[in-house]
Amino acid sequence: MKRNLFSKISGKRETPLAPAPTKPSEQSQAQPSLDWSDQLGKSDYLGKAADAKHAAKAAVKAGEHDKAWGLFHEQKEHYLKHAQAQGFDAEQVMRMDGSVSEDFANILRIEKRHTQALVHVLYWIVTSPQTIKRHDTKLEAYFARCKFQTTMLGDRRCTAISAVH
């Protein structure tokens, strides 16, 4: 019997496969469906959200911003359905919801609607569980695009966050 990589590493032998079914009726009973959507049912909201995000990113690359906008909203809907099904608290729901705002900001930036894009960047930052360097970089860039009065990044961050809270 051949050994796979797992059995070589773990030292455990894999169990031999069952004999192949000979009749069509045996085949349908012997092999489980490989289609994940059948096994997960209609409640695979995170999978649907990932599909919507992937399609939205492709639409952005193709210059179809309205289509991408709708697909990002579809992603948010699936996130909210997942959150409801899992019993998330308000903070967890906001984190999931806010994660899509970076993509909304990107579309608005491409369309040169910088002030509206800044609102989405602020929402993304405020709902993030932790501060990362990309937050400061994007916040500075979006403030610059809006042509607001020059201030220190720390002042902007504090002002933006205190305005939301």
Image (cartoon, rainbow, N blue to C red):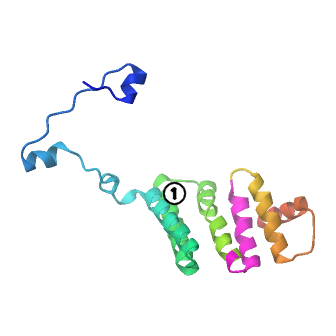
* Amino acid identity at mark 1: Ala
- Residue at the far left: name it: 23
> Going 54% across and 53% down the picture, which residue do you hit?
88
Secondary structure found at label 1: helix
Depth check: 20 or 74 in front?
A: 20
Q: Residues within 10 Å of mark 1 (few under 14, many from 20)?
A: many
In magenta stretch: residue 124:
yes
Position of the N terminus, as image quadrant, is: top left
User: What is the magenta segment's predominant secondary structure?
Assistant: helix
- Magenta region: 110-128
The answer to whether residue 163 is seen in the rendering is no
User: What residue is shown with label 1?
Assistant: 83
Q: Is residue 5 left or right of residue 34?
A: right
Depth check: 129 or 143 in front?
A: 143
**Residue 107, above or below 21:** below
**Residue 4, above or below 109:** above
Q: Which percent across, then down, holds residue 150? A: 93, 70
Q: Is residue 26 left or right of residue 89?
A: left
Q: Which percent across, then down, holds residue 72? A: 55, 70
